Amino acid sequence: MSAHRQTLPIITRGICLAVGLVVLLASAGCSERCRDLDRQYQAATSKQPTFDNDAYSEATRGAARDGLRSDTDVHFAGSLSLEVLNRLVGRALKTTIAAKLKAVESLDVAGVQPVDIEADPGVASVELSAASDVCGHCFRVDAALEGDVGVDVPMLGTRKTRLDGSLKFVAPIDLRPSEKDASGGRVTLGLSNLAEQSRPIVIEQLEGLPGRWSDVLSGALQNVLVQKLTDAIPDVTLANFETPELGIEGLKWAPLGLRVDATTQRVTVGFRSNLPASAGRPLSSFDDLIELDDSTGVAVALAPELILSAVRAGFRTGSIPDRYTSDGEAAANGPVRFTLDGIDVIERSDRDAGIALGIGFRAWHLPSFGHCMWFGGRGVIGVSARDGELTVGVERVSMETGSAGSILLQQADWKASEWMQSSSSLVGTSLSSESLSLPGFDWKASGLSLTSNDRAVAVGFGIDGADPR
């Protein structure tokens, strides 16, 4: 009996030692697995730089020197068709001419006293054509003038007469920094060199006056109108392209320049951010997406990698939560972290369903204590343009690979996680028609269309209204 009692403690001690050894070995295994996964996570994040300010500075310097070429890397692009440009230039000229010419109150006519006049000129039509023989971003502007002129003719009294004429000149269309937002750009029509061009205005006829008076007043009116129009006239802003407001701390934008395509006679503007160069594509990548007709006169386009780089930058700067609980909730000290592997345009069999962007990711479960694991998957963001509205939303998050135990993490609703919702929001903001504004006019987008290739995504739309405010 006593021998039996002596044996029990020995057996118990043996079992405890064995269990302790198993626990120790398991802990050592978990610890080594966690260290290995942490090393992999650190290596993955080190390959995903947040910003590249040196490349950004060099790109903006190069743009000032070389302009916007087809091989220039751009992160965001906008395009205006000739039809839209005609409308914008027509309105700009009408406003400018009316302001300048209404200031004419009297004409000095040789041999008689000054003739009082009241001019109410306007622009009947405008035609633009690329003037590449003058400069790579120049247009010929051919405007038909119309309007009424009230003339107080000596001995004849006040006569109301119709003005017919033309305004012809060559002017550059440039991209300049936005007046409101340094990161945006404004498309301008240069009018400062009108004075250097011979006979930009021709008054063809003042109807309703005796022939002699018509000839004399036409020449005098023509001379004073030219003087008024060419006297320190500033460049006219036709349109503003505002770069996407992505809400990422430290993100910067700069306009790279403007390109005129003489074949399609459209104007394309390009912008660069300080995100890594991989966020962009050569301008030529956008060309087949922004071939515009009269119904889709404006387009905005971007490389999908812009979204990927923006989310990565958001993770690193804290603008987008980068740590989560195992239930998918954002938490400052959460054990789950994400790295992004890539983004691609997913082809759909039904083109009316729009397009989809697939973001590849890896989730890393790295708790202070406990089991370390990972799983890889893809989040899909759907983009469609229906009934004149751009719709963007997270469609699904699918799990594709994982380590032992990762099935527990896959139960969380990662589709609703803040980083996936932020990614969706970035897509919608970047492709919004709100990136375009027309100074002094109210307008709305119409006829939205969505196009994509394996390098870029673009939204085209028409302009309705554009009534003066």
Image (cartoon, helix red, strand yellow):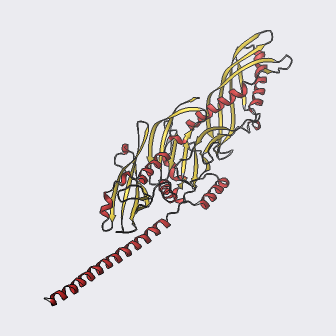
Q: Nearer the viewer, residue 260 or 415?
A: 415
Residue under the image location 32 percent in, 59 percent down: 410
Residue under the image location 54 percent in, 48 percent down: 77
Q: Nearer the viewer, residue 127 or 431?
A: 431
Q: Nearer the viewer, residue 38 or 369?
A: 369
| On screen, residue 336 above or below 285 | below
Q: Is residue 346 left or right of residue 193?
A: left
Q: Is residue 107 left or right of residue 254?
A: right
Residue under the image location 37 percent in, 51 percent down: 416
- Residue 389: x and y in percent read 43, 38
Name the residue at the front extreme: 2
- Residue 46: x and y in percent read 50, 67
- Residue 274: x and y in percent read 57, 56
Residue under the image location 59 percent in, 53 percent down: 252
Residue 353 in view here? yes
- Residue 51: x and y in percent read 56, 59
